[in-house]
Image (tube, rainbow, N blue to C red):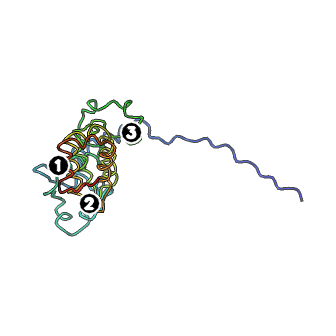
Amino acid sequence: MPARTTTPEPHRQKVNMRLDNTTNDAYQHALKEAEGGIYSDLKITCGGKEYPVHKVLLCTRSSFFKKACDSAFKEGESNTIDFLEDDTEAVDSMICYVYNGYYPRTELVTMGPKIENLNSTWKIEEFGEATLGLQIEYLTLHAKVYALAEKYEVSGLKEMALRNFKFIADGEACSRAEFSDACEIAYTTTIDSDRELRDAAVKALYDNPEALDQDHAKALIGSKCHINF
């Protein structure tokens, strides 16, 4: 019986399935319009400010929002969620992240470090953070956003806040008062079992021991944060 031969399949050329420029521009325009409140079906209030938002964007990123919107409680019936005790800047950053994929909310990204100077250590092209948020002044914001993202279970936001915090803290930031403020936030707004942000702060001090000579660092170690070395 002659050997059975098989006909090789024709070579299949790989097809690039990336969005064309027209479609990509349309998506970007739609998100920008949505962030402005068009066709909003949910309202978030915080610190006297109102955010007209969209359930489909929030509920697919956060189990908290999904439960709130699907429930028979006040939030689900009134289509309004009040953040009475949360930091307004952190809430604003959370909403900015949901619509844009980054925070803080600013158009002045050119004020941040140059991308070519960051890319060797920080995979900025992979993560896509706006570079303005990678300045020392934003350390406390990243700590607040980290805690808020955990509280409201916003996928991706907690990880971004931690990356930003680690990047800034790895250097001279440890010698600045903003670092101590951020550490206090990390230790007072997160649960004890959530160690990632706290461990990042401790590692930064270990890697930069000269910062321990600063008065604010000494006060931090002796405070209720219970940072031990």
Q: Verify CB contact (< 8 Å) between mark 1 and mark 3.
A: no
Q: Is residue 19 above or below residue 61?
A: above
Distance of mark 1 from mark 3, alpha carbons? 31 Å
Q: The disc labelled 2 sits on which kind of residue?
A: Phe
Q: Which residue is under mark 1?
A: 219
Q: Earlier in the sequence, mark 1 or mark 2?
A: 2
Q: Quadrant of residue 83?
A: bottom left
Q: Which residue is under mark 2?
A: 65
Q: Earlier in the sequence, mark 1 or mark 3?
A: 3
Q: Earlier in the sequence, mark 2 or mark 3?
A: 2
Q: The disc labelled 3 sits on which kind of residue?
A: Trp
Residue 122 tag number? 3
Within 10 Å of disc 2 (Cα), the crowding (few <14, some 14-19, many 20+) is many
Residue 102 percent location from the top left of the image: 30, 43
Q: Which of label 1 and label 3 is nearer to you?
A: 1
Number of numbered discs present?
Answer: 3
In the foreground, 21 or 227: 227
In the foreground, 178 or 220: 220
